[in-house]
Image (cartoon, rainbow, N blue to C red):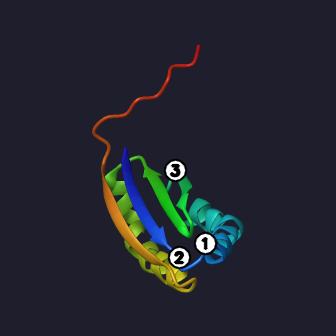
C-alpha cells in the first residue's frame, strides 16, 4: 500500500469549504475515471486547514498517474488561494480491526 498525504491551508474556512464542495462534485469522479487511486480521504484539522490521504495499491500504481495529477491538483488548490505540502511513502505498519 502506498499513501500520499497533502497538508493544505486556505486563508479562510469559506475557501476550504468551497474547495471541498468542488472536490466532491468534480474531482472525486475524475479520480475514479482517470487514476488508480483506491481511496481519497479529506480531514478538517482546523480553521481553513485540511489533510488529504490518497491511497494506492503500490508505488508503481501511484507513479502511473501522479505526475499528471499533481500539477492539476496544485493548480486547483492555488485557485482557492491554498498552500499545499506533500508527503508520500510506503505503508510500513497498518492496523485494521477484524470484523466479528
Disc 1 to disc 2: CB gap under 8 Å: yes
Dot 2: what SS? Answer: loop
Q: Where is residue 14 shown, x and y percent of the image?
A: 67, 75
Q: How many marks?
A: 3
Q: CA distance from mark 1 to mark 2?
A: 6 Å
Check disc 3: other Cα within 10 Å, few if <14, some if 14-19, many if 20+.
Answer: some
* Foreground pick, 5 / 1: 5
Which part of the image, by quadrant, shows the C terminus?
top right
Report x, y in % for residue 56.
43, 51
According to the image, label 3 marks what residue?
Answer: 38
31 or 47, which lies in front?
Answer: 47
Determine the residue positioned at 52% across, 50% down.
38
User: Is residue 11 depicted above or below 40 in this figure?
Assistant: below
> What is the spatial separation of the Cα atoms under label 2 and label 3, in whole angstroms?
26 Å
Element under label 3? loop
Distance Cα–Cα, label 1 vs label 3: 23 Å
Disc number placed over residue 10 in the picture, else none: 2
Mark nearest the camera among 1 and 3 is 1
Please give left or right for residue 29 compared with residue 77 in the image: right
Residue 46 drawn at (x, y percent): 54, 61
* Horizontal side, residue 84 vs residue 20: left or right: left
Question: What residue is pinned by disc 1?
Answer: 16
Amino acid at each position: 500500500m502506498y499513501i500520499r498525504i497533502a497538508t493544505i491551508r486556505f486563508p479562510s474556512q469559506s475557501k476550504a469549504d468551497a474547495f471541498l464542495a468542488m472536490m466532491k462534485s468534480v474531482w472525486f469522479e475524475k479520480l475514479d475515471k482517470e487514476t488508480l487511486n483506491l481511496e481519497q480521504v479529506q480531514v478538517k484539522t482546523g480553521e481553513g486547514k485540511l489533510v488529504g490521504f490518497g491511497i494506492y495499491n503500490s508505488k508503481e500504481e501511484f507513479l502511473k498517474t501522479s505526475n499528471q495529477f499533481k500539477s492539476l491538483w496544485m493548480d486547483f488548490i492555488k485557485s482557492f488561494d491554498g498552500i499545499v505540502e506533500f508527503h508520500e511513502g510506503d505503508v510500513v505498519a497498518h492496523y485494521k480491526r477484524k470484523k466479528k
